[in-house]
Amino acid sequence: MGGWDVYCAICGSTFRSNVSIDSDDETDLTYSGEIIGQSDIKWLDTLCALGINPNVPGENKSFITGLGTYDDAASIDVAQGEDPNVPLDERGRVSYFSTYHDYSQEFPIVFPFHEVCYKEILLRCFKNEKINGDVLYALCEEMRQDLHNVLALDYGEPFPPFEQYWECNKGEEVLVTHPVNIPQLAIHLDSIAEEEHIVDMEKKMSKSASVRNRYDIFDKLPFELRQNIFEFLPIASVFAIKAASYSMHACPYASWKQRLETDMPWLWEVRDKNPFKSQVMEAKVSKMFTELEEKSRYNKKTVDYIPGIVNRRRIWGICEDIRSLYHDKLAEAQGHQIDSTANLAATRARFAAFKAENP
């Protein structure tokens, strides 16, 4: 069998950035540089890992290593980091960590994650909830499928190849594009950065007779009813109606962040902005939400999507599954009468179906 690659337990992608791009390979085992674009794929190289140290005192045995890289022979080379549970050898150095059971290592296997997947997406998906590492490790161990250390999860589209060695299949560039630092997303965010003079101009216009006397059907509705309308609209439509109607623009929508977390939870950059400064900004935000919703969906036939956004949305969905299964497992560990085996079995069945569809 020889060696093999190990993949990120969260996103399912490789730990090597030296992937084939625009090679002369006639078998389509190469990525398109045009599709990858300006995405910095060096993020693939940096990892951390979740492990268990049975020798530490106390109830909590888990640890998260410092940063490192993947080595051959299914092992990782990492720094100790700040977790006191990380095992050290007799010289005070980080112990050898293996990602598979070869029965020669002193400690149980570790589950490596990309630093970006773990710190930027999984922890954000958990909303900074303090994660019980022992429970998360037990879940990973129960869901682990094979030597590649992937979990029985729905890894979305495109489904990672999970071959003995990573395959750079043309059309699957999404899997290696950076899911956080996305140049195309930065352009969209810049488009809603409003100039101060536009706000001032709108304030002057709002006081003019032409604006006050302009017919607005929503102006006839009670204030409470106008607010209720927002609850029945997608987030992009909320901003569209505010941009089109001054009376709706003037109607506060305090729960818009919660709605954004429901409709587009993977678009966290907008939550810190004030998108209601003007109707011009609301129109831009509505357009941005509509475009990003469309461009965050993978299409096998045409590249009409933004690869980094597709990858972020894909990984976010995986993290939501992990969070759901983790909470079931945590409830069981705390003595609640919850049977997590049904959800685990259903997840495994979906994973098997995806693998069958993507041989």
Image: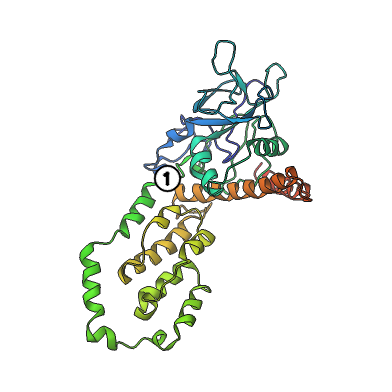
Residue 223 on image: x %, y %: 44, 82
Residue 240 on image: x %, y %: 40, 72
Q: Quadrant of the rendered structure where residue 215 is?
A: bottom left
Q: Quadrant of the rendered structure where residue 1 is?
A: top right
Decide if residue 156 is on the left or right side of residue 103. Answer: left
Decide if residue 317 is on the left or right side of residue 193. Answer: right
In this picture, is 134 found above or below 172?
above
Residue 262 on image: x %, y %: 54, 61
Residue drawn 32% across and 71% down? 279
Residue drawn 46% across and 56% down? 295
The local secondary structure at tag 1 comes to: helix
Q: Residues within 10 Å of mark 1 (few under 14, many from 20)?
A: some
Q: Amino acid at mark 1?
A: Ile
Residue with the mark numbered 1:
35
Task: Look at the image and tell me whether residue 285 can be seen.
Answer: yes
Query: Camera-side residue: 55 or 282?
Result: 55
Q: How many marks?
A: 1
Task: Look at the image and tell me whether residue 19 can be seen.
Answer: no
